[in-house]
Amino acid sequence: MSGPFSLQGHTALVTGARSGIGRALAVGLAEAGADLVLVGRTGSMEETEKAVRDAGGSAETLVLDLAEPSGIPSAVRALLARRRIDILVNNAGAIHRAPAEYTEYEDWRIVLTTNLDAVFLLCREIGAQMADRGSGKIVNIASLLSFQGGLGVSSYAASKHAVAGLTKALATEWGPRGVQVNAVAPGYVATGFTRSLREDGERHAEILGRIPAGRWGTPEDLAGSVVFLASSAADYVNGHVLVVDGGWMAR
Ligand SMILES: NC(=O)c1ccc[n+]([C@@H]2O[C@H](COP(=O)([O-])OP(=O)(O)OC[C@H]3O[C@@H](n4cnc5c(N)ncnc54)[C@H](OP(=O)(O)O)[C@@H]3O)[C@@H](O)[C@H]2O)c1
């Protein structure tokens, strides 16, 4: 691939790349020419590694538990000492489904730590190097719950609203130094994350009935938007939250 959407010669780091949306994003980025650093909390990244190689990219796995933020800066600095990261995709996410009054503080913390603290630390470590270099792209995976409250997911909605805010704050700080920070907000996508919703007949029908596309999203539906935001075609796009939801928000 050549032209403004090509990622040839660029290295992308994708968190939560073992499954779901993260795997599809890693493959999409590799198809556009990028090499990949895949971040997961277990070493079993073989399927994603193979899919990335089949798509033409190289793949290296970095094991990191993002719910334990104290380990993030040192691990990332060790990586950056030997590899340049041109594209950071903060995709990993945690969700806790329970009414607010039954949400334990520990569960609240895991969601906020994984979805917000870890995103901040990865942005800080990798974004600082990008800003010093004068170029780089960060794409954070937000959610429809960056705009809406959802149902029974207060910690998740709070964390994803914060991801949208962090995206805009960093875009403002680093835009003058050549780094674009944007977010993609997926609609309802069929992954392990949403299995319980799809198994609940009533919720499934309710959600499906509001999606103008008439179907749930697939992880692959997200790849093109992330490739775009990671490419030079998006050099003048900064601080934007791009909704990819089959039309849910338009309704
Ligand atoms: N599916 C949807 O409808 C939807 C909608 C809006 C936004 N999103 C967002 O999309 C992103 C990906 O979700 P998905 O739908 O693809 O679900 P998924 O398949 O469950 O992926 C979540 C990923 O996050 C990783 N992760 C979770 N906690 C982690 C931790 N402590 N350390 C390292 N990695 C961790 C998981 O790793 P393991 O594989 O090791 O568990 C997994 O790879 C999330 O940010 C989610 O909020 C999803």
Image: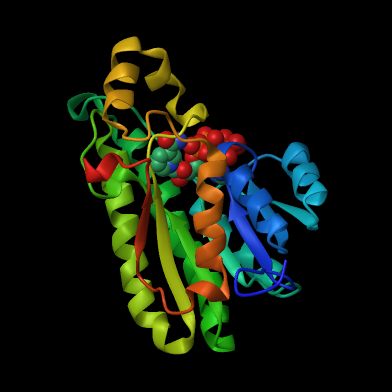
Front in this rendered view, residue 122 or 206? 206
| Display coloring | rainbow
Residue 229: image location, x then y, percent: 50, 65
Q: Quadrant of residue 79?
A: bottom right
Depth check, front residue: 200 or 130: 200
- 170 and 240: which one is in front? 240
Location of residue 140 by image quarter:
bottom left
On screen, residue 28 versus residue 239, left or right, reads: right
Q: Residue at x 29, y 56 (%)?
A: 162
Q: Relative to 113, is 169 above or below?
A: below
Figure check: 59 above or below 132: above
Residue at the spot 80% in from the left edge and 56% down from the top edge: 56
Q: Do we see residue 135 in this rendering?
A: yes
* Residue 73 seen from this side: no
At 52% from the left and 27% from the top, the residue drawn is: 192
So how many labels did they put on this image? 0
Residue 215: image location, x then y, percent = 41, 28
Depicted 33 relative to depicted 50: above or below: below
- Looking at this view, name the residue that lies furthest to the left: 101
Q: Is residue 1 left or right of residue 112?
A: right
* Quarter placement of the N terminus: bottom right
Left-right relation of 137 to 46: left
**At 61% from the left edge and 37% from the top edge, which residue is drawn?**
19
User: How far from the left and from the top, in percent, is residue 96?
Assistant: 36, 31
Quadrant of the image containing the C terminus: top left
Q: In the rendered view, does 216 fall on the left or right side of 19?
A: left
Instruction: Provide residue 115's location: percent of width, then percent of height.
Output: 41, 49
